[in-house]
Image (cartoon, rainbow, N blue to C red):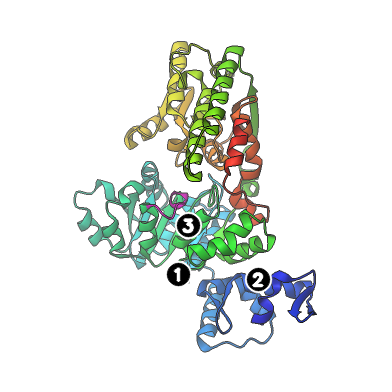
Amino acid sequence: MGFLLDRLDRARGRFVPLGDGRFIALTQQLQTQLRQLAAVSEPEKVGRRIHALGAAAIGTLLEEAGEVEADAAWRKHAARLREADDWTPGLPSTLQAELRDYQLEGFTWLARLARLEAGACLADDMGLGKTVQALALMLHRAAEGPCLVVAPTSVCPNWAAEALRFAPTLSVHRLGAADDRAALVASLGARDVLLCGYGLLHQEAKLLTGRRWQMVVLDEAQAIKNAETRRAQVIHALQAGFRLALTGTPVENDLDELWSLFSFVTPGLLGAREKFQKRFAVPIERDRDPGARAALKTLLRPFLLRRTKALVLGELPPRTEQTILVEMEPDERAVYEALRQKALAAIAALEAPDGRRKIHILAELMRLRRACCNPALVDPGVGVASAKLAALLDLVDELRANRHKALVFSQFTGHLELVRAALDARGVTYMYLDGATPSAERERRVAKFQAGEADLFLISLRAGGTGLNLTAADYVVHLDPWWNPAVEDQASDRAHRIGQTRPVTIYRLVMADSIEQRIVELHAAKRDLAADLLEGADAAGRLTERQLLELIGG
């Protein structure tokens, strides 16, 4: 069998070469089953090695195989898997929420994996209730010991509020608010939940990794996409009976992020980082190998659950997206073109190693992106009006005249400051939020906007793209395109989420014939990278130097 598995990649249709000019013909079904087995196993000196968690992906395959030779430990493990699959947990009676059907299915899936101490990544679209599904599981396991929730600092108040609302029998503690953090952690027991912001991780690494948690929940889990960061290393070192990652974007840019995420969720399942790169990342991202992609899907499928809003559109109002191309005025075009030519000349003159060269190219790209937003962001004294600002103000006038409220996102706080000045001059009421806004003030401003005390909410994309419920708005305006559209989608979902009763319209203001328009064209390849992997479409990799230069137009 191992001999045959090793030669599957050389198959020509149904025929697999055996050597010496001989071939063996396999049915399509058998070839698919063998590839599935190869996906979850690695060659050893004798036979093949299967990670204990990988067995979950081939349960059906082994049942169809007829007679299987296995030792007692394997048979016991397989029996545990079958038992968990047949078991249906009861919903905790203390849960103060009516779960929708897909949320109940999510809870059942989580509880079964928790019973196996396997780990899970709940990757539902933003706004579909990942938090309430996690809280239901936390109640289900509460008697087994304390739970640790790690989330962006700005999202921790939302966790405390949701726990109080849906799971009031849990005792929630904020690590950042404790006078004696060590004493608090030592005192935690059954039904206790500790909330910790990512910012505290490196400070309290020894404290948090020094004890065992019955469950660790990682919210906005894409925060550990870079395995080399101190944050990711601390997360990987946490001791837990069950590990749950919550994220609407398991992959934002490349598959190395997926490896880092699942090193937390299911340690060891994807192997060492170098092996993962050779076995999956390079074949999928560089070679577009459908076999490697299918193999990775097979391996992850038991531990990753993703539902899109298409499954619950009956409960959500329509969502319309429109890209508005804004033409530069002649003076603005002259400024942009001068910057573009200067960027090309500077890059052509560079004499630096590849890595340093790419950094310089990205810096030039950033300058051009800022110029597209408003020439004043590049040169405050240039005295050239912004066509994008004029387009935004026209749009705001129209929205206000028709009694609509809008969220306005930009990745540049300097850009938002220029917008604020223009809105102040017109007497437009707005709320403002960026990364420097204190947590308590953030909550206050959200509450005021939800109560109807402002027409607009200006939000820094990074600071407000997650953890906010802003259903008072029925319009979303993105002032500048982000590299990865999944980040924009998360921001848009602040308004288009359960609880929204009106149709939501999303506008993207994009400067025509500029780097912005070229970034938006890239979105077709990068949108929903995680969903593409699950559904079988090609995944996009990192941008090369050549691709970056093409964005500039040279």
Query: Is residue 401 among the parts visible in the rendering?
Result: no
What residue is at 65 percent from the left and 33 percent from the top? Answer: 320
* First along the sequence among labels 1 and 2: 2
Residue drawn at the location 61% of the way across and 54% of the way down: 285
Residue 500 location (% of width, % of height)? 55, 37
Label 1: state its secondary structure.
loop
On the rendered structure, is 330 left or right of 131?
A: right
Residue 261 image label: 3
Q: CB of mark 1 within 8 Å of CB of mark 3?
A: no
* Residue displayed at 33% across by 46% down: 199
Residue designated by label 1: 117
Q: Is residue 94 left or right of residue 316?
A: left
Dot 3 or dot 2, earlier in sequence: 2
Name which of mark 1 and mark 3 comes first in the sequence.
1
Q: Secondary structure at mark 2?
A: helix
Rendered view: 266 above or below 341: below
**Does 179 lie within the magenta span?**
no
